[in-house]
């Protein structure tokens, strides 16, 4: 395919969706990808670049001149343009912006670059249709026709006053169905949900999900309409959130995938494995204190895995429940003391069930009532301790502004493993002769 | 608030978003909720019912007569209506459908009820704007005005031929901007992405996410347009997917939340804890085989937690990477042998790093070269074994049509715990005097 046959490439790519071209270009060499993009027109090229994987895109843009990048940038919606510019080296950023012909879109991009990527301001785009509350329907339709060039899809038309303060919205449907001289004032809907520029992206996602919105207007601190966020960006936020959580839960740091290099995967995995190793060493050291008991009763070692595994499982379950309810915050939250109270009741109940079963197992197998009691009592204590750690850690991390999902990963398992061993052997030491 | 003051309730609820009313009603008694809904008009009431939590809604609908339910149902979009009807007891379902006045919407609901909830057919709604390819723009605008009553938001207008086969789409924007006598044939876009009724909901979500679609038309096996799926339903699918995965990864069965009853939470947690208990007992049984070695060298027991924890962590990391790449399937997938090959290289590399560090720890602490070698060699073997299990299990589950995320939960940890113990003690038995 890559025999530099421009006509052929153009013909085959005709009618192919840009997302599919991107998936193809992700797999070929940078110079071949560049050749294909040169052949395509800038509008399709811009869409293809948007859809490329981040590493491919970075490599690819390094090859281009700032002027070439600018040509693609002007074809993008302002929010996507800013995301791509923010990934460039600082010097190239300035050159690309300088190379943008259209002063309005350059100004939009510079305005959006001021916002942090993770807040509403960083997600929003400037392309939207705005109508003044004093206009008539015919004036608004004219404005729609004028603005429509920059807007890919029409969501609602936002209604503002003379000071550009957000007043409400009016649907295109209502405009089409109204007579030409009706005033916007008489048909607009003042009941509109908006977000503020500084809001966290996850908060924005929650709001849009709760109210089933396709798009939401963004206002600044003065209540002025500055942009809008569409649901496709929120889908990305939700997907990223899930991936981040999955990585934290499984102890993989950074953003690696199965098909990354062996070195990249190892580098992402080793930190948590080393923490596990340190945890294991601490566990070994804890067991060392009870060497005497173990020498007297080797069967004591048999149940170390059982106690450890139960502590680990309980800890992960508890923290996941808390992380989940932190993710779906509702207006009616129980107090922390009520949460801890319920957690304790669940822990006592499950702990007692597990204790009875484990006592029966140990008693029937080893015919040793004391060892059975040690295991059973340890399990109750470990379940309660692990539940407490699993509930308190994510709540504490959340208060500190750290992602609470960190608490459902290897961190909580390692901590609970060590605590479990200490509790088990300490109880054994007390109860065994 | 609940002093049966209808006027007051109506006034306060005026302008409040239905999603907020739902959040409020989730917290009050069923009969109070019913009273509030009676006061509201049916359209708002229907929205409130849609947004209620599932358990609250179920309790609430049990109180209503089929005729009352039908009044709310007719105000809903067909896909939401079907979701609610499907949750009713079979007898009530029939009564509600019989009580729907509008024969068209009753037919739509019955058609949609035929599809499985998890496939494209189960997600789609019938409300959409369809234009015949031979119409003119003016005819289409008339049709939009006529159909618009049933459609909450206008996405694209879908273009079909005389046999109702999907031919393409045309944006409302293009229709507004075209002259009245232009034919749809000349302005429509034949390049349209669609899904088929039988497609799995996760496949639909992947397609909509990949191509950044707000809505996608659904065709049946004959290529006829039967409905459309909108992005808000996909946001729900993605959220549910993430929650399901989280539950599987943490060993919580069923759909519980932190604020459910103690019995519900315990019931969801106990199954996996019991599996962990069985695993722990098998581990104890495995250690039992090596009782002699343990009695000769109690220090051997010290490193059981270290080996177990490493095996568990490696297994979860490996399976998460596989689950993640199964979730983001791309067209260019590596073969299974290549995946397993890369997994082995990563395992050898990380295993050797961990082995060197652990050898140093054991050697420096215990001054025992043989024990250090046992721990180091075991770690390499355990890392390789756990990587293999963590990679192969989700791939195998996926082939069997089971959610591969099951493999990143307690199942893989428990299996790897036991395997790790056996490998460690077997190697100790071989190498220690």
Image (spheres, coloured by chain):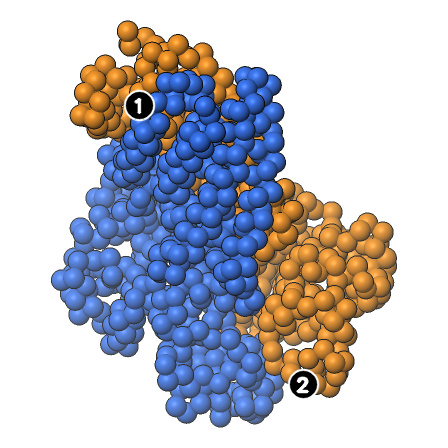
Chain colours: A blue, B orange
Q: Residue furthest front?
A: A433
Which of the pair A239/A327 is nearer the observer? A327
Q: Quadrant of the N terminus of chain A?
A: top left
Chain of the residue that carries numbered disc 1 in the rendered image: B
Q: Please name the residue shown 64% across and 83% down the image.
A: B12
Q: Quadrant of the C terminus of chain A?
A: top left
Residue A295 at least partly seen:
yes
Q: Residue A200 at x, y = what percent?
A: 39, 66
Q: Which mark is residue A77?
A: none
In the image, taking residue A406 as reference, residue B264 lies left or right, namely right
How dense is the environment of label 1, judged by Cα within 10 Å: few (below 14), some, or many (20 and up)?
many
* Disc on res. B379: 1
Spatial separation of the CA atoms under disc 1 and disc 2: 69 Å
Relative height, residue B31 to residue B236 (above, below): below
Read off the residue under disc 2: B11
Residue A326, percent from left and from top: 48, 58
Mark in the foreground, 1 or 2? 1
Circle 2 crowding by C-alpha within 10 Å: few under 14, some 14–19, many from 20? few
Q: Residue A183: x, y in percent?
A: 55, 91
Q: Which residue in the rendered view is the most extreme toward the left? A: A91
Residues flagged by tags 1 and 2 on a common chain = yes
Name the residue: 30% across, 34% down. Answer: A282
A42, B296: nearer the viewer? B296
Q: Quadrant of residue B97?
A: bottom right
What is the chain identity of the residue bearing mark 2? B
Query: Could you tell which of marks 1 and 2 lies nearer the N-terminus?
Result: 2
Instruction: Please give left or right for residue A373 compared with residue B323 in the image.
Output: right
Q: Is residue B177 above or below residue B433?
A: below
In the rendering, at what x and y percent does residue B361 appear?
21, 27
Q: Nearer the viewer, residue B368 or A295?
A: A295
């Amino acid at each position: 395919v890559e025999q530099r046959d421009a006509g052929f490439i153009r013909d085959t790519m005709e009618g192919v969706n840009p997302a599919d071209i991107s998936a193809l270009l992700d797999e070929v060499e940078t110079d071949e990808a560049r050749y294909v993009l040169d052949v395509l027109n800038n509008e399709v090229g811009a869409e293809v670049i948007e859809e490329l994987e981040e590493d491919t895109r970075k490599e690819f843009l390094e090859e281009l001149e700032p002027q070439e990048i600018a040509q693609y940038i002007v074809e993008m919606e302002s929010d996507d343009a800013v995301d791509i510019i923010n990934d460039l080296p600082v010097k190239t950023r300035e050159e690309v912006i300088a190379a943008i012909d259209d002063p309005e879109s350059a100004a939009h991009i510079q305005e959006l670059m001021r916002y942090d990527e993770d807040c509403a301001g960083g997600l929003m785009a400037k392309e939207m249709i705005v109508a003044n509350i004093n206009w008539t329907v015919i004036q608004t339709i004219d404005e729609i026709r004028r603005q429509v060039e920059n807007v890919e899809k029409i969501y609602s038309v936002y209604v503002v006053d003379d000071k550009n303060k957000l007043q409400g919205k009016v649907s295109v449907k209502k405009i089409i169905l109204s007579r030409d001289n009706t005033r916007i004032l008489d048909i607009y809907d003042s009941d509109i949900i908006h977000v503020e520029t500084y809001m966290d992206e996850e908060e924005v996602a929650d709001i849009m999900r709760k109210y089933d919105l396709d798009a939401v207007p963004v206002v600044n601190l003065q209540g002025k309409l500055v942009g809008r966020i569409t649901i496709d960006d929120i889908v990305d936020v939700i997907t990223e959130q899930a991936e981040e959580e999955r990585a934290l839960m499984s102890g993989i740091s950074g953003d690696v995938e199965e098909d990354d290099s062996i070195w990249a995967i190892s580098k992402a995995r080793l930190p948590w494995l080393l923490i596990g190793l340190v945890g294991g060493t601490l566990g070994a050291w804890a067991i060392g204190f009870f060497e005497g008991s173990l020498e007297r009763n080797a069967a004591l070692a048999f149940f170390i895995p059982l106690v450890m595994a139960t502590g680990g499982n309980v800890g992960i379950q508890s923290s996941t429940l808390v992380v989940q309810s932190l993710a779906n915050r509702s207006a009616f939250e129980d107090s922390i003391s009520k949460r801890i109270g319920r957690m304790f009741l669940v822990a006592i109940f499950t702990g007692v069930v597990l204790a009875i079963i484990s006592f029966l197992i140990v008693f029937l197998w080893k015919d040793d009532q004391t060892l059975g009691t040690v295991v059973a009592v340890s399990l109750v204590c470990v379940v309660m301790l692990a539940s407490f750690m699993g509930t308190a850690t994510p709540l504490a991390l959340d208060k500190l502004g750290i992602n609470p999902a960190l608490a459902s990963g290897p961190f909580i398992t390692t901590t609970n493993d060590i605590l479990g061993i200490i509790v088990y052997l300490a109880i054994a030491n007390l109860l065994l002769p």
